[in-house]
Image (spheres, rainbow, N blue to C red):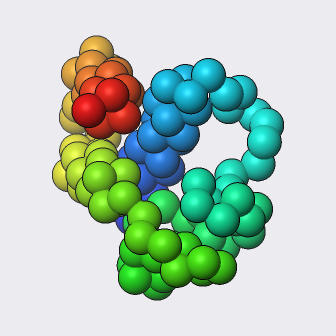
Amino acid sequence: MIIIQFLLGASLASFFNLVALRDARGESIVRPRSHCDTCQMQLAAYDLIPVLSYIILIGKCRYCKSSLSATFFFNELMLGIALASLNIQHTNLPFMLSLIMMAFLSSFDLVQK
């Protein structure tokens, strides 16, 4: 259960990062597909696995080898750890929703820096 909670948290953070970044650029969250900001190559599904892809690719684009922001990696890691550390059966819903909402809003702060 802890692994599933971690994956859920990391996936939510990854989506929040996407929403915040695309909102700052005035882009749609649906199109275009995820791509490298430097070389514009479309990323494959295995390049988009939260936390794991960053580690496997050593923080670089698979195609052009440009560095990827570690900020988003740490955001995914922290929300993953936060959700994994909760005892879901004994955590009340308002607390959990507040945690997720704060993570969502922090994504916008990370992008606006």
- Viewer-side residue, 105 vs 8: 105
> Residue at 78% across / 42% down in the picture?
32
Q: How many marks?
A: 0
Q: Is residue 85 above or below residue 68?
A: above
> Residue at 48% across / 47% down in the picture?
14
- Viewer-side residue, 1 vs 99: 99
Q: Is residue 76 above or below residue 63?
A: above
Query: Where on the picture, by quarter, is residue 96?
Result: top left
Q: Viewed as shown, does residue 13 lie left or right of 80?
A: right
Q: Viewed as shown, does residue 61 lie left or right of 97?
A: right
Where is residue 13? Give x, y as percent.
42, 43
Q: Viewed as shown, does residue 68 lie left or right of 85?
A: right
Q: Is residue 113 above or below residue 82?
A: above
Is residue 37 visible in the rendered structure shown here? yes
Where is residue 51? Give x, y as percent.
41, 66
Q: Viewed as shown, does residue 33 lie left or right of 46?
A: right
Q: Which residue is outermost to the top?
A: 94
Query: Where on the picture, by quarter, is residue 106?
Result: top left
Where is residue 50? Give x, y as percent.
48, 61
Query: Where on the picture, by quarter, is residue 35?
Result: bottom right
> Residue at 24% across / 51% down in the picture?
78
> Residue at 62% across / 70% down in the picture?
47
Is residue 45 visible in the rendered structure shown here? no
Quadrant including the C terminus: top left
Q: Is residue 70 above or below residue 30?
A: below
Quadrant including the N terminus: bottom left
Q: Which residue is outermost to the front?
A: 38
- Viewer-side residue, 30 vs 96: 30
